[in-house]
Image (tube, helix red, strand yellow):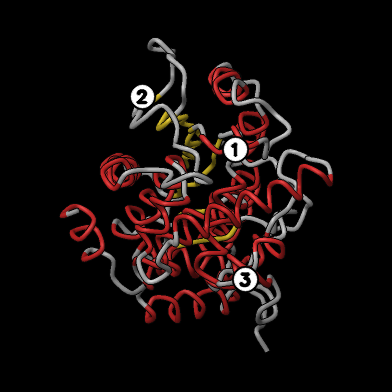
Amino acid sequence: MDFVKATLERIKPVNTELLHQAQAKLDNKTKPLGALGRLEEFGRRVAAISGTLSPDTGKKVIFTFAGDHGVTDEGVSACPKEVTPQMVLNMLAGGAGINVLARHAGIEVRVVDVGVDYDFNGAEGLIPRKVARGTRNLAKGPAMTRDETLAALKVGIDLADQCKAEGVALTGTGDMGIGNTTPSSAIIAAFSGISARELTHRGTGINDIALENKIRVIEQGLAFNRPDPKNPLDVLAKVGGLEIAAIAGLVLGCAANAIPVVIDGFISTAGALIASELHPNVRDYVFAAHASVEIGHRFMLERIGAAPILDLNLRLGEGTGAALAMSLIEAGVKILNEMATFEQAGVSKE
C-alpha cells in the first residue's frame, strides 16, 4: 500500500500557466482564433502536461492488459473464456485490430499478461506480469483479494515509471478479457448508485435473455459484496478485474510521471475511473479516446469529466479507439510545434 500512497503523492495539478501560454502560441498561428477546435485543446493540454511549449510525440505506446474473469461462469459473455489467450496470441502475432490501427498510427503495442488463466510459456513479445489466473466469480464473493488488487495496480504503476525512464511521450490503454464488461458495469454502478439495468449493455453481442441474466449477475454481485463507493480499492477488489486494476495503475503512474494517457473504451475507462477516484488531479492527465457503444461508458466519462474525442460506434476494446485518438492528439501537438506564425509566414494578422 505504501507504493500507492507514494504514487498518489507524486500527482500534481497540471500547470495552468503553461495551458495559457500554449493557447497564446496557438493564437499566433496562421488561422482565425480557435479555428482548429479541439486540435488546439489537444496541443495545449499535452504541452501543459509535459511541461514544455514544444512537446515531443515521437515515442507512443499502447499497453493492452489481459486478464480472465470468474464471472464468465455465469454466462455473461457470448464468447468462452478460451478466447482471451487466443486473442493475446493473435495480438502477439500482429493480427488483431489493435495491431492494425497502431501500425497505421505509428504506435508500439505492448501486451501484458496480468491475469490470464493460461500458460503462455514465454511467448515472444508478451510482458509476463501474471498476478493470478483470473479473478473469482464476483456474483459469489469478492473478485480479488486486497493483495491481488495491489499487485495488479503495481504492474501498471511500474510500467508507467518505465515509460518515464524510456522517454515515452504519449501512452494509451487497452484491454483483453472475456467477460470484462460485467465488472466494468459493476464498478460504475457501485460509484454512481445508478441501477445495473441502466448501465449494462450487450458486451460481445449477447441476446436479450443473456442480457437479463447479466443484469441479474451484476445486481447479485453488488448486493453480496457491498463495495464501498468511498473506498475505490474496495470497489476494485470486490467487483473489478486484474486488467482493470493494471489500467488504473498505469493511469496513476502516468499522472505521477506527467505523461499524457489516452484511455480506450468502457473497460479502460473503468480503470481510469478507479484512478480518478483515488486522486482528483488524475483526470487532468487523461484523454478519453471515444464514446463506446456500451451504455455505461457515458456515465463513467461524465463522472471523470472527460469529453470523448471520437464517436465511431466502437466496442472492440484492445486499445483500438486509443490508437485512433492518439493520432489526432499528435496532430494537435504538431499544429502547436510546426504551424507558421503570422510573422513567419508574412501574413497580416489584422
- Considering only vertical position in the picture, is 95 above or below 178? above
Q: Quadrant of the C terminus?
A: bottom right
Query: Residue at label 1?
Result: 318
Q: CA distance from mark 3 to mark 2?
A: 36 Å
Q: Circle 3 is placed at which residue position?
A: 194
Looking at numbered disc 1 in the image, what kind of residue is underneath it? Glu
> Which percent across, then down, holds residue 330?
56, 53
Q: Residues within 10 Å of mark 3 (few under 14, many from 20)?
A: some
**CB within 8 Å, label 3 to label 2:** no
Q: Quarter-wise, where is residue 94 in the image?
A: top right
Quote the CA–CA distance across marks 3 and 1.
27 Å
Q: Residues within 10 Å of mark 1 (few under 14, many from 20)?
A: many
| Residue bearing the label numbered 2 | 128
- Residue found farthest to the right: 208
Q: Is residue 142 left or right of residue 31?
A: left
Question: Which residue occupies the extreme bottom position in the image?
Answer: 350
